[in-house]
């Protein structure tokens, strides 16, 4: 029993070291002895299942200061290469992940500009209640003199947390979307931002990148804010980011984007719409130069070298990434990564628009031999991409193989109801082929990564597809009347009559009559020999037709009459002649027959079909095959976020009052001029999800072995309604009539079902072994109302005060959190299925789990309740100290119940140690008294928050000394307190040694001083030396036995030796060729 208590107390002591952690394994004081670096697990690339896009990334370095962690690496966007996609300084499709950034989409005016959203003094309710008396104000909103729309900001923090935010007028603060419990503030003087996460870290975004455009006048605004500093909660640790902003006069590069517009014009509400032809315009834009330069931290830095100029774009390419350690204020190179480039070259190159930077290889270089490299090489699809700004692209901007003279305006008929003449006569708005092409969409995409081992992974992509669902309108002719009449003799009148009602649904109100008069023999008839009377029985109008001209010849006439819907008409023919004489009448109308195109079409970029891993001998190691399903399209067919019908209605209307003017004066006698403008652009706006334009409800990953035999499969299901029915804002002045803003798409990213199957060889089929059903709920449910004011009429010559020319509509933006609320898990086995139901609830401030209830098939209910600083309003457990630092992710009090019976409780108390807030005491529930008992005490921390003294209540103290700029512990002294260390060495010596970069000899000398002190005769002293940012180089236990660790030029563990130099363990790294 006593032994168990000791082990338990040690575990509790170690768990307390993880000061700011909700759960998980404790962070040890002494680093574990280094193990041999594993070969990378090549071929393991997760896939974003809902879009079918593989997450391809290569790690470079994990920066870890002790309290701040930043993963550095490369990532590749595998959704396909768009024609107008510029390559980054890494290469086409590649990105460097090295920090964080805030970007924004300006809606109307920049929020901070004059008249911008920050200055808006009206609420949405007030705007929506305005009437004609507020016409001047409303026109100011409609004309963008004053902004009613908040800009949409996107943020990315190091480590992967990302989202969006807006400024909420109702809450009077910046609010993240979805709610993540973060705090966002803006310095209005400098227009810079700070984000504070729930762990108290602050991220400063002060490096501003500007962007300008000459669209509707020159406008220059801040487009992005790059991270410049991270500061931990106690402000004792930081990381600084610097940027290169100088090349080419500070300009990143200028771009020109072309659009084509076909305009139809109608004057003064006539029935005629004239085709005004096509105009092509270019919009010029530029961005200021901003590339990462250095990341500085207390024990080193990361330097990004860019020397070589680019052939395809302004600026320079990323040449290398070098990691330095810091020793005595000098930087020592530890690791170097080199990027090799060439270019994707379009046919007949002449300007930079024919080139795109391509990353051909990525190598880790030995610090001692630059020719010794661990290289990743990349192979891409060899279909030649067209030049930048080529019109050979589909609706989504991907290459579709059409000739260079392809038109941005698609070969589709105008859908505006007013343009029936052009639809009827099969006159399309353009001649372009904007359909997706399943082969050409693969142009330039990454298809193979060869690793340093010479093993490789091959990616097999295929085009997304979807059901077209375009509406096809066909004009058909319908015969609604046939009337034949023959003579019965001269002086005898033969009459034939029929009636009809003109329908409401005729395509036009013109009825076409074909009246055929035969030759006749009675020119001296009492009236006429042949007559046709068409009469509007409702309105009284009538039309009369007779055989005129040479009566010895047949005569046919084709009158077109404009009829009135719902009026009843009569057709009557009369003949005064012999039986050989006749009148034949046929009447036709035109109807619109609407059909829906349900053909499967290609578009929306690429999805992964399979990923295959090979060893260095070209032998397959394994393969993952992906199949897809959507509720809209069925098997292997996706759901598109903007369908063909919507894209083919990509027009907007403009209505102008152009007054009659004479002698310099204009009168209020409006002459209405209307325009319908069809716009063809490189990409058509639409809702998307993580860059995906096509999504899937169900994706199945099937794993097969080297022989093609199935191992198992994972079926995942999603609810895509949040994407397909996403928010968009009506705006008749925008092509397509919608401004897309989806703020609920994050709800679709989480699975609602996962089924795991194993392959049963006996059944020759898959067998379900585990199923999980997920449910989600919204937290802090809140949405805000906004007003959208737009013009319905423009006045190029001024307006009359009585004219109502604007409209207002409202919309809402949801800002609630979206969290997992329950998991139902079923394990299937022959002895009986086991079902476990887990319910989760969340803290309203930090949005972390505060209660978990798990119920299994045996009826037992396990409940865990966690309390955070925000759960207290007083100073309980030091919660006030943590709240003051915005540290909201710390679990202070955790209780566990079984069937509502309390079984355990753990409490961590925090205190102020010279300005930093750290754990001071761990208490645990006594099973005998049900009261809290003190178990572990933390008595001392250094300036950076490193623990210097700890003890189990009733036990001996353990003290630590740190060095290497306070990054690593060099001694662990059991049965001693920190005051004894300072009395032996002197506080100044300890402080100076902590800030130094000692040699092994200096460490050993300091430790020997302690070991030789009489005050330490009952203490056990272990010591450690390090190669900073690489690993431990030696460990000496309390008995004086030393183990040494040696590293190669790639900073990998090479050998482990004992104190006599004998090799205990050796690792040799062999790569093919």
Image: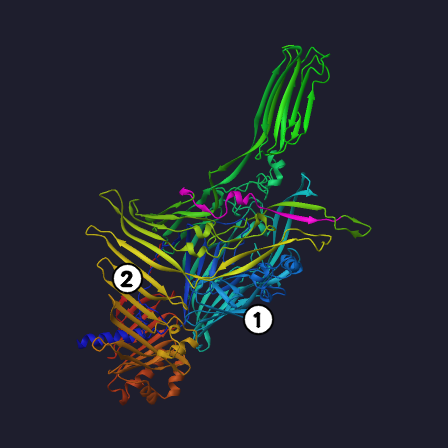
Q: Residue at x 53, y 65 (%)?
A: 167
> Left or right of 101: which side holds 218?
right
Quadrant showing the C terminus = bottom left
Magenta highlight range: 633-659
Q: CA distance from mark 2 to mark 1?
A: 48 Å
The answer to whether residue 998 of the structure is visible from this angle is: no
Q: Secondary structure at mark 2?
A: strand
Indicate whether residue 784 is drawn in magenta.
no
The type of colouring in the image is rainbow
Residue identifier under label 2:
854
Could you say where residue 702 lies in the image, as x and y percent from the top left? Answer: 33, 47
Instruction: Judge by depth and name the residue closer to the eye, 701 or 270.
Output: 270
Q: Position of residue 314 (x, y in %)?
A: 58, 58
In the rendered image, which quarter is residue 973 located in?
bottom left
- Note whether residue 896 is visible: yes
Question: For mark 2, does the 10 Å Cα neighbourhood hold few (<14), some (14 to 19), or many (20 or more) residues?
Answer: some
Residue 100 x/y as whole percent: 48, 65
Q: Which residue is mark 1?
A: 188
Q: Nearer the viewer, mark 2 or mark 1?
A: 2
Q: In the visual, does 639 lie left or right of 909?
A: right
Instruction: Please tell me which residue lies in front, 381 or 512.
Output: 512
Residue 781 picture quarter: bottom left
């Amino acid at each position: 029993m006593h032994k168990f208590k000791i082990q338990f107390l040690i575990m509790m002591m170690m768990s307390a070291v993880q000061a700011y952690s909700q759960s998980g394994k404790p962070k040890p004081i002494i680093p574990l002895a280094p193990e041999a670096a594993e070969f990378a697990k090549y071929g393991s690339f997760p896939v974003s299942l809902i879009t079918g896009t593989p997450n391809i990334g290569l790690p470079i370095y994990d920066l870890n200061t002790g309290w701040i962690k930043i993963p550095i690496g490369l990532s590749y966007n595998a959704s396909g290469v768009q024609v107008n996609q510029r390559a980054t300084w890494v290469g086409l499709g590649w990105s460097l992940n090295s920090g964080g950034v805030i970007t924004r989409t300006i809606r109307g005016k920049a929020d901070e500009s004059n008249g911008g959203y920050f200055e808006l003094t009206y609420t949405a309710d007030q705007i929506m209640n305005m009437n004609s008396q507020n016409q001047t104000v409303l026109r100011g909103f409609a004309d963008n003199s004053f902004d009613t729309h908040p800009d949409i900001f996107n943020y990315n923090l190091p480590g992967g947390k990302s989202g969006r935010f807006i400024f909420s007028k109702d809450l009077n603060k910046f609010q993240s979307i979805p709610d993540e419990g973060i705090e966002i503030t803006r310095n209005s003087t400098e227009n810079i931002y700070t984000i504070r996460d729930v762990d108290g870290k602050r991220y400063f975004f002060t490096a501003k990148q500007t962007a300008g455009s000459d669209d509707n006048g020159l406008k220059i605004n801040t487009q992005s804010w790059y991270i410049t500093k991270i500061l931990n909660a106690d402000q004792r640790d930081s990381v600084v980011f610097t940027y290169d902003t100088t090349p080419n006069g500070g300009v990143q590069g200028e771009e020109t984007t072309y659009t084509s517009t076909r305009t139809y014009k109608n004057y003064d509400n006539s029935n005629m719409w004239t085709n005004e032809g096509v105009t092509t315009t270019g919009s010029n834009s530029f961005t200021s130069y901003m590339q990462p330069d250095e990341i500085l931290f207390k024990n080193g830095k990361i330097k990004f070298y860019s020397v070589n100029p680019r052939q395809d774009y302004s600026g320079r390419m990323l040449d290398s990434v070098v990691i330095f350690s810091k020793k005595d204020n000098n930087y020592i190179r530890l690791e170097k990564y080199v990027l090799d480039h060439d270019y994707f070259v379009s046919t007949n190159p002449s300007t930079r628009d024919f080139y795109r930077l391509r990353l051909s290889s990525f190598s880790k270089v030995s610090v001692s031999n630059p020719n010794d490299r661990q290289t990743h090489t990349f192979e891409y699809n060899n279909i030649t991409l067209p030049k930048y700004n080529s019109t050979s692209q589909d609706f989504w901007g991907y290459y579709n193989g059409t000739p260079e003279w392809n038109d941005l305006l698609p070969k589709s008929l105008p859908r505006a109801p007013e343009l029936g003449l052009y639809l009827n006569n099969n006159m399309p708005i353009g001649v372009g082929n904007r359909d997706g092409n399943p082969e050409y969409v693969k142009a330039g995409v990454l298809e193979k990564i060869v690793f340093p081992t010479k093993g490789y992974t091959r990616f097999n992509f295929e085009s997304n597809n979807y059901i077209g669902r375009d509406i096809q309108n066909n004009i058909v002719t319908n015969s609604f009347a046939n009337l034949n009449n023959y003579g019965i003799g001269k002086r005898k009148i033969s009459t034939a009559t029929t009636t009809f009602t003109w329908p409401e649904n005729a395509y036009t109100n013109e009825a076409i009559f074909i009246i055929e008069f035969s030759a006749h023999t009675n020119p001296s008839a009492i009236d006429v020999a042949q007559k046709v009377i068409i009469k509007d029985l409702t309105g009284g109008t009538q039309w009369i037709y007779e055989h005129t001209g040479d009566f010895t010849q047949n005569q046919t006439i084709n009158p077109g009459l404009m009829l009135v819907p719902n009026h009843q008409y009569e057709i009557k023919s009369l003949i005064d002649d012999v039986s050989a004489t006749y009148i034949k009448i046929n009447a036709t109308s035109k109807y619109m027959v609407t059909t829906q195109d349900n053909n499967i079409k290609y578009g929306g970029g690429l999805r992964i079909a399979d990923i295959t891993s090979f060893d260095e001998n070209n032998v397959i190691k394994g393969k993952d095959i992906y199949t897809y399903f959507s509720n809209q399209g069925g098997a292997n067919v996706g759901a598109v976020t903007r369908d063909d019908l919507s894209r083919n209605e990509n027009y907007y209307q403009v209505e102008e009052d152009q007054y009659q003017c004479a002698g310099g004066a204009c009168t209020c006698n409006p002459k209405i001029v209307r325009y319908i403008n069809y716009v063809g652009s490189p990409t058509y706006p639409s809702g998307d999800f993580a860059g995906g334009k096509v999504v899937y409800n169900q994706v199945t990953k099937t794993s097969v072995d080297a022989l093609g035999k199935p191992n198992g499969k994972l079926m995942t299901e999603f609810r895509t309604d949040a994407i397909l029915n996403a928010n968009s804002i009506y705006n008749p002045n925008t092509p397509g009539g919608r401004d897309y803003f989806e703020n609920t798409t994050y709800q679709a990213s989480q699975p609602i079902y996962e089924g795991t199957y194993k392959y049963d060889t006996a059944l020759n089929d898959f067998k379900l072994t585990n199923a999980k059903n997920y449910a989600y709920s919204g937290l802090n449910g809140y949405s805000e109302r906004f007003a959208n004011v737009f013009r319905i009429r423009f006045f190029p010559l001024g307006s009359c005060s009585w004219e109502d020319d604007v409209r207002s509509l409202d919309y809402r933006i949801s800002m609630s959190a979206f969290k997992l609320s329950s998991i139902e898990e079923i394990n299937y086995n022959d002895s009986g299925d086991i079902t476990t139901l887990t319910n989760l609830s969340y803290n309203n401030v930090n949005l972390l789990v505060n209660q978990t209830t798990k119920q299994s098939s045996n009826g037992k209910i396990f409940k865990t309740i966690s309390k955070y600083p925000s759960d207290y309003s007083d100073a309980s457990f030091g919660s006030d100290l943590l709240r003051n630092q915005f540290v909201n992710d710390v679990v202070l009090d955790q209780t566990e119940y079984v069937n509502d019976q309390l079984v355990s409780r753990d409490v961590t108390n925090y205190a102020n140690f010279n300005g930093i807030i750290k754990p001071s005491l761990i208490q645990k529930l006594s099973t005998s008294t049900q009261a809290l008992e003190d178990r572990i005490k933390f008595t001392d921390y250094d300036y950076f928050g490193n623990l210097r003294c700890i003890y189990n209540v009733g036990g001996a103290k353990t003290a630590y000394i740190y060095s290497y700029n306070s990054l690593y512990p060099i001694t662990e002294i059991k049965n001693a307190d920190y005051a004894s260390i300072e009395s032996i060495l002197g506080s100044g010596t300890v402080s100076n040694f902590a800030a130094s970069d000692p040699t092994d000899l200096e460490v050993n000398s300091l430790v020997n001083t302690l070991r030789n002190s009489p005050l330490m005769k009952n203490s056990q002293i272990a010591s450690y030396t390090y190669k900073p940012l690489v690993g431990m180089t030696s460990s000496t236990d309390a008995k004086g036995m030393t183990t040494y660790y040696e590293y190669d030029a790639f900073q990998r563990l090479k050998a482990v030796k004992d104190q006599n130099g004998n090799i205990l363990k050796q690792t040799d790294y062999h790569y093919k060729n």
